[in-house]
Amino acid sequence: MSAENLPWVEKYRPQCLDDVYGQTETVGTIRKFAKEGRIPHLLFYGPPGSGKTSTIIALAKELYGKNYKNMVLELNASDDRGIDVVRDQIKNFASTRQIFTTGFKLIILDEADAMTNVAQNALRRVIEKFTKNTRFCILANYSNKLNPALLSRCTRFRFAPLSNDAVRERVEYVAKMEHLHIEAEAKDTLVSLSHGDMRKALNVLQACQSALDNPGTDEIDSDMIYDCIGAPKPRSIETIFDAIVKNDWADAFSTMIKIRRVEGLALIDLINSFVDVLDKYELKPATKAKLLQGLADIEYGISKGGNDNIQSTAVIGCIKDALECEA
Ligand SMILES: Nc1ncnc2c1ncn2[C@@H]1O[C@H](COP(=O)(O)OP(=O)(O)OP(=O)(O)O)[C@@H](O)[C@H]1O
Ligand SMILES: [Mg+2]
């Protein structure tokens, strides 16, 4: 596939550690390990799109250069969860002798938190067995889903959600490379709605580009960002909020349903936005606390498959109720 057809997340995947934005401390420590030639088993954990896979691949590229293919084994634990498959692959890879190169081989075990507990248990033996000439790098979203015995064999690095500045900087770089025009406000919207997930930011940016009629000259505006992300526009949120505060139940309900239908919004999108905009309203702490607690309960209800109409009215009830505290 030519670079032109690649999704931007792949096209702009960091090629070296310098391309990894926003994880300065982690990258610094890893670089130091590499320089001293004493890389421990590594565990990277943190939310999606924060650069875990990118960082280890960038490190491996710096370490091995054109030997990458011989020296690095990338396994995706969620592809074939059975430990037998993983163990065989690891065994084959780790036990082939290196004739032309020296140093550790690297095994990247992506999405390890998707492995069963049994598999994780088996893995710790495998790690021990091959420590002589192999280093493992385990990648996961949640460290608490990993076996403690596995954790204790690795040096842990937490990948925090990227800062807005890091996302902005990368977005600006990609926009420049792609000759993309994006309004300043739209950039702010994109950065803040990405919530530190660079993959999301780049995917949305690319979706917006393909929605433009004349990508060379047209400008991406805020509304396009909201549409691509599927997040409610601030004025829609305001309209709904207003209706709930000022009008009766029936009217508030129909306003909410109407806007949701027009914009194709799920109730959960609305709740997320309510929580996001809450800071902009001057509310008593007690009101805010009540509101957040109520919305959190509804969010949980939705995740458990609660009825949409009932959960929608609950949102109205929760907001009306919390605002009683203000009066
Ligand atoms: N820190 C970063 N600096 C630059 N680009 C990044 C960074 N983090 C993510 N990206 C971009 O987002 C894409 C996805 O990142 P990556 O695969 O590293 O995320 P991840 O942390 O492994 O997420 P997941 O938990 O979903 O596997 C990369 O291809 C890259 O384009
Ligand atoms: Mg990853």
Image (spheres, rainbow, N blue to C red):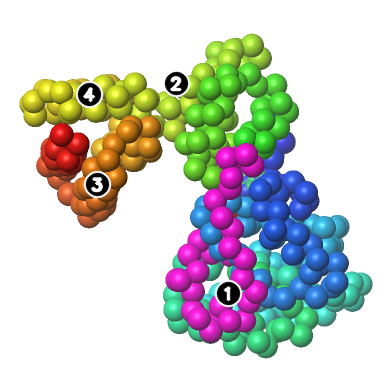
- Residue denoted by label 2: 223
Distance (Cα) linking label 3 and label 4: 20 Å
Disc 4 versus disc 1: nearer the observer = 4
Residue 249: which disc? Answer: none
Of the residues under marks 4 and 1, which one precedes in the sequence?
1
Answer whether labels 4 and 2 touch (C-beta < 8 Å).
Answer: no
Which segment did they paint magenta? 139-167
Distance (Cα) linking label 4 and label 1: 56 Å
- The amino acid pointed to by label 4 is Asp
Please report the residue visible at 58 percent of the width from the left and 74 percent of the height from the top: 86
Q: Classify 10 Å Cα crowding around label 4: few (below 14), some (14-19), many (20 and above).
A: few
Give the camera-side residue of 161 and 218.
Answer: 161
Answer whether labels 4 and 1 touch (C-beta < 8 Å).
Answer: no
Of the residues under marks 3 and 4, which one precedes in the sequence?
4
- Residue denoted by label 4: 242
Secondary structure of the residue carrying numbered label 4? helix
- Residue denoted by label 3: 286
Secondary structure of the residue carrying numbered label 3? helix
Please report the residue visible at 72 percent of the width from the left and 76 percent of the height from the top: 40
Secondary structure of the residue carrying numbered label 2? helix
Please report the residue visible at 24 percent of the width from the left and 51 percent of the height from the top: 293
Give the camera-side residue of 292 and 308.
Answer: 292
